[in-house]
Amino acid sequence: MQTDSATGSAEGLVVALDIGGTKIAGALVDGDGRILLRTRRATPAREDGETVMGAVEDVVATLAASPLWEAAGAVGIGSAGPVDAHRGTVSPVNVPGWRDYPLVDRVRRATGGRPVTLVGDGVAMTAAEHWLGAAKGHDNALCLVVSTGVGGGLVLGGRLHPGPTGNAGHIGHIAVDLDGDPCACGGRGCVERIASGPHLARRALENGWRPGPDGDTTAAAVAAAARAGDPAAVASFERAAQALAAGIAATAALVEIDIAVVGGGVAGAGEVLFAPLRRSLASYATLSFVRNLTVVPALTGTDAGLLGAAAAARSADVEGSWARRAS
């Protein structure tokens, strides 16, 4: 387990947990968004549910050993989904041992009865970007995570809008190709099926791109090839950008957002993604009330999950039945 600490104020301190298929991260975060203590361990994703929970409890125990622990008043969790924040359960696709797992109740017990707020990882990233990142100051925003999957969350009227179960804004499963390939969700032609890292790389390979001597077939390798001018790599990013633009424009037309913030590993491609994304968006977002929509990179980086979990824990007045808080 890796642990790091920093100095800062304990004012407004909360416990933040970021739970995904590869890592379980924990932190103590103050009211200004400074991470005063952090720790993480690998997710035993292929083990049974109790083994996975044991890893969460290990992370909590490391945080609880800090002198700052007693000052932490609440707990926020950003988890891979689907989540059901109303019931306090999670069923991450990439953690088979957790199906309708009562994560809120288990974390509440592990943290000495503190109130617990659960959100999906896309909503957590949105909360982080609205609090401290590129969506700060925007009352109506869509934030996207484009990585192994494509997730997202909404800010409407200046507040997070996660919906009744915590999954609102899940742009990855908007259908943008009516005759497209089947998606793992059961639908067809979803944004995720076109724009996620694995599918972006698959499309490049199918159309003639070949990896270098290292055999790297990730989206990052496709991005490097696109920068070098490989036509199949360029075309794959343009197709991904088109799918993202269609989903963003549809969302903007529905709820009138004025900014879309894009983070995640695929967004690390930079202008290889953002240049065609802006071009495509200009041809999809044409109505007067969405024409000025801007698209920008996320700013909170790899800390988005922890900062978003902390923001969720601090937001007791978030509108809607989206979080189960147990005291």
Image (cartoon, helix red, strand yellow):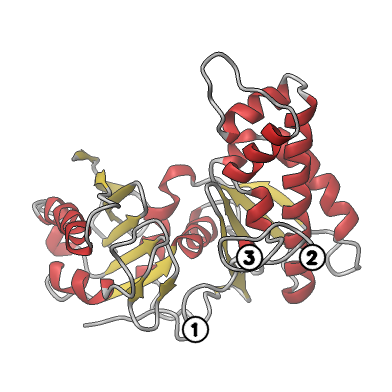
Image quarter hosting the N terminus? top left
Q: Which quadrant would the C terminus be assigned to in this image?
A: bottom left
User: In the rendered image, is residue 138 in sight?
Assistant: no
Relative side of 321 to 141, left or right: left
Give the residue displayed 82% in from the left and 53% down from the top. 281
Report the disc number at residue 173.
3
| Rendered view: 133 above or below 182 | above
Residue at mark 1: 164
Q: CA distance from mark 2 to mark 1?
A: 28 Å
Q: Quadrant of residue 265?
A: top right
Residue drawn at 59 percent across, 68 percent down = 186
Camera-nearest label, 3 or 2: 2
Q: Earlier in the sequence, mark 2 or mark 1?
A: 1
Q: Nearer the viewer, mark 3 or mark 1?
A: 3
Q: Residue 234's spot in the image, x, y percent?
A: 77, 31
Badge 2, how many Cα within 10 Å: few under 14, some, many 20+? few
Please tell me which of labels 3 and 2 falls first in the chain.
3
Q: Nearer the viewer, residue 14 or 220?
A: 220
Whether residue 164 is visible to the viewer of this picture, yes or no, is: yes
Q: Amino acid at mark 2?
A: Leu
The front one of 166 and 157 is: 166
Of the two numbered discs 3 and 1 on the same chain, state the one appearing first in sequence: 1
User: Circle 3 sits in a helix, a strand or a loop, which is it?
Assistant: helix
44 vs 35, nearest the viewer = 44
Do the residues bearing badges 3 and 2 touch, measured as CB atoms within 8 Å?
no
Dot 3 and dot 1 residues touching (CB under 8 Å): no
Q: Secondary structure at mark 1?
A: loop
Disc number at residue 178? 2
In-image side of 248 versus 125 (left or right): right
Indicate the secondary structure of the residue bearing disc 2. loop
Give the quadrant of residue 236.
Answer: top right
Could you say where residue 169 lies in the image, as x and y percent from the top left? Answer: 60, 69
